[in-house]
């Protein structure tokens, strides 16, 4: 055992402990999980993405809102309640059958999605967002598809993450406060311990949440791929021919017909789909992941246009962002600033001093230093 | 779990000087929380894996535990177009019957409900769930719950029949102003023409098959 490890076990200033200290590997695991919330920018992308997507979905269905979620739906409130009775689901929408109550819930869903996207009081709003998304999903359960399913899971998991720590109104408020009073809180000893524990628990729960999200996305692609491998039509390369022939997933029949004219291309794209999906969990720890993520995003953009499934595709593309490291997201952000001009600068909290970002080689660090952690 | 204070400062974004290390009870709390969170996350991930993976000996053996954990809030299904995409699509039509006071029964023409959905989707970059999913999934769920026989013993089957009837009733009512007291559905399953040069030939769907559902009485037209 080295001196350094000993130092880790009995740090300066700690009252000598009567309980045996944790073995070094355990200490290291605890430190790794609690010292720092990882991938905060990726979490922010998930928050912004799913908030925006759900808002777009709700607004798109505005003319059909009563038919889908309201008291006038063919899946009547009584049927929904009966089903909830057997499945154990909860929805705020079936608490009352009055149209005014439904309109209030719909308005609440719009506001919640927008606030979640913006990252205002994110921890509380994320709980509300999960409540709204599960409530609306359970109410129209027989009208949902894989995209809705993924949004529900992500809303549930994002409650546990510190997804409001970056690129949010919360972050902006905290950075302003930090500038105004740099030493705003020096709590007394007991309170300080509580703050420290809370920070560590927040980081811990966040890290576990991000791990679960990443695993979930791997399983999603892995199982989609494994089931396709079992399919006869995927094996003989004609699966996409049948997909392109589905009337309800063919907003542009001419386009689908045009693609269908090239059986070789259809077979290649079909094989690539299966290969990339099955390979996905295995490439994540190499640079190849950027190639695979690019192919998957291309595939989902294709699904969005050819099959008329923008919410489904959007949900999948946003989920892929969990695998982008913060330094990649930050350089994407810098690229975005260069091209996007100054319009957004007032809205977003970061990069208030552009000269700084160019002078510091590690873009993750200044961010870490300038923002207080609210949780 | 205690680290050099510079690291801590950078990590937590605190600029209040070097925060002292955690006290013993605090360290215990954090350690217990780590154990609880890591266990929960790993158990969750394992159960989700077993749930979404193709059925295997492990998932069969622990089916009860897996389902107890997954349902209802972590239910998921990633089998879009898998194992095979649909190679036939149902075309659902409805017709209505009116019984006049003197007992004469008048049956209307078939109205193609699926065609309405297809027309809605056409040229629409962002089709509504009401067009893409409502009737399609209602029929799929109904067919699934009723099997091929058409009996509706289970609660789920009865609920889905009510749902399908409500959809049909609303859509037919949208198209005609006539009052009616019964609805019948007809489902024509049209195979998608196979790729001409496909190796191994077409999937085993030969011709369209037609299924007539029984006449369903409409109790109320208000909904």
Image (cartoon, coloured by chain):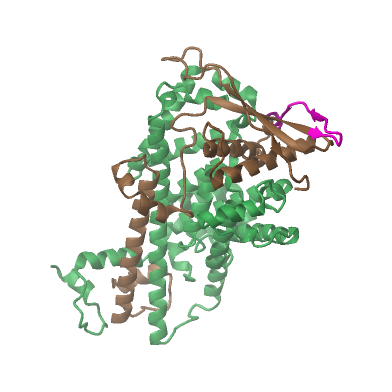
Instruction: Name the tint of chain A in the rendering.
Output: green
The residue nearer to you, when weighing A33 against B149, is B149
Q: Which residues are magenta?
A: B98-116
| Horizontal side, residue B24 vs residue A128: left or right | left
* Snapshot quadrant of residue A247: top right
Residue at the extreme left: A1
Q: Quadrant of the N terminus of chain B?
A: bottom left
| Rendered residue at 73%/26% (across/down) | B110
Residue at the outermost front position? B102
The percent coordinates of residue A37 (x first, y second) are: 40, 63
Residue beneath the point at 61% across and 57% down: A113
Whether residue A325 can be seen here = no
On the image, the x and y values in percent for residue A117 come to 59, 57
On the rendered structure, is A294 left or right of B39? right
> Eyeballing the image, is B217 above or below A348?
above
Considering only vertical position in the picture, is A328 above or below A107? above
From the viewer's side, name the closer residue of B167 and A302.
Answer: B167
User: Magenta stretch containing residue B112, yes or no?
Assistant: yes
Residue B112 position, x and y percent, is: 71, 28
Residue nearest the observer in this picture, B53 or A57:
B53
Q: Is residue B143 above or below residue A136?
A: above
Q: Quadrant of residue B92?
A: top right
Q: Quadrant of residue A110?
A: bottom right
Image colour for chain B is: brown
Q: Nearer the viewer, residue A111 or A246?
A: A246
Residue B222 horizontal/vertical position (percent) = 78, 48
Residue B156 lies in magenta, yes or no? no
Point 28% across, 73% down: residue:
B2
Instruction: Say if A171 sits above or below A66 in the image.
Output: below
């Amino acid at each position: 055992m080295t001196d350094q490890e000993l130092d880790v076990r009995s740090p300066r200033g700690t009252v000598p402990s009567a309980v045996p200290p944790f073995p070094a590997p355990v200490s290291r695991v605890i430190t790794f999980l609690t010292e720092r919330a990882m991938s905060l920018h990726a979490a922010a992308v998930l928050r912004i993405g799913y908030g925006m997507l759900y808002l777009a979905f709700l607004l798109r269905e505005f003319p059909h809102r009563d038919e889908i979620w309201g008291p006038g739906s063919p899946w009547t409130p009584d049927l929904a309640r009966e089903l909830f009775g057997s499945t154990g689901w909860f929805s705020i929408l079936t608490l009352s059958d009055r149209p005014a109550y439904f309109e209030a819930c719909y308005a609440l869903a719009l506001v919640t999605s927008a606030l979640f996207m913006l990252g205002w009081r994110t921890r509380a709003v994320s709980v509300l967002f999960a409540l709204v998304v599960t409530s609306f999903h359970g109410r129209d359960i027989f009208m949902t598809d894989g995209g809705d399913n993924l949004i529900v899971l992500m809303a549930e998991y994002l409650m546990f993450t510190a997804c409001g720590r970056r690129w949010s109104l919360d972050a902006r408020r905290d950075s302003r406060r930090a500038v105004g009073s740099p030493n705003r809180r020096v709590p007394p000893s007991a309170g300080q311990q509580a703050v420290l524990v809370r920070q560590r628990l927040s980081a811990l729960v966040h890290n576990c949440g991000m791990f679960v999200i990443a695993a979930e996305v791997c399983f999603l692609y892995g199982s989609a791929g494994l089931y396709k491998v079992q399919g006869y039509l995927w094996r003989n390369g004609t699966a996409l021919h049948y997909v392109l022939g589905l009337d309800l997933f063919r907003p542009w029949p001419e386009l689908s017909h045009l693609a269908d004219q090239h059986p070789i291309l259809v077979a290649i794209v079909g094989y690539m789909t299966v290969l990339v999906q099955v390979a996905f969990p295995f490439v994540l720890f190499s640079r190849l992941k950027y190639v695979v993520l690019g192919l998957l995003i291309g595939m989902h953009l294709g699904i969005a246009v050819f099959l008329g499934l923008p919410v489904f595709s959007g949900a999948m593309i946003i989920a892929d962002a969990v695998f982008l490291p913060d330094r990649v997201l930050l350089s994407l952000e810098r690229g975005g600033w260069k091209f996007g001009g100054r319009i957004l600068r007032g809205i977003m909290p970061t990069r208030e001093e552009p000269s700084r970002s160019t002078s510091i080689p590690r873009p993750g660090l200044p961010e870490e230093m300038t923002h207080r952690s609210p949780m | 779990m205690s680290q050099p204070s510079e690291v801590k400062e950078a990590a937590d974004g605190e600029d209040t000087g070097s925060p002292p290390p955690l006290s013993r009870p605090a360290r215990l709390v954090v350690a217990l929380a780590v154990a609880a969170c890591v266990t929960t996350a790993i158990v969750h991930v394992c159960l989700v894996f077993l749930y979404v993976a193709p059925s295997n000996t492990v998932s069969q053996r622990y089916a009860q535990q897996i389902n107890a954990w997954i349902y209802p809030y972590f239910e998921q299904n990633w089998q879009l177009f898998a194992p095979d995409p649909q190679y036939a699509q149902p075309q659902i039509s409805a017709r209505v019957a009116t019984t006049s006071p003197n007992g004469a029964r008048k049956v209307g023409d078939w109205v193609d409900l699926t065609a309405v959905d297809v027309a809605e989707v056409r040229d629409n970059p962002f089709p509504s769930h009401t067009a893409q999913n409502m009737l399609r999934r209602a029929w799929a769920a109904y067919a699934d719950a009723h099997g091929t026989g058409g009996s509706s013993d289970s609660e789920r089957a009865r609920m889905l029949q009510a749902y399908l009837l409500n959809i049909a009733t609303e859509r037919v009512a949208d198209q005609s102003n006539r009052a009616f007291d019964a609805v019948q559905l007809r489902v024509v399953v049209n195979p998608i023409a196979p790729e001409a040069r496909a190796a191994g030939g077409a999937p085993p769907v030969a011709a369209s098959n037609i299924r007539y559902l029984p006449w369903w009485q409409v109790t109320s037209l208000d909904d």
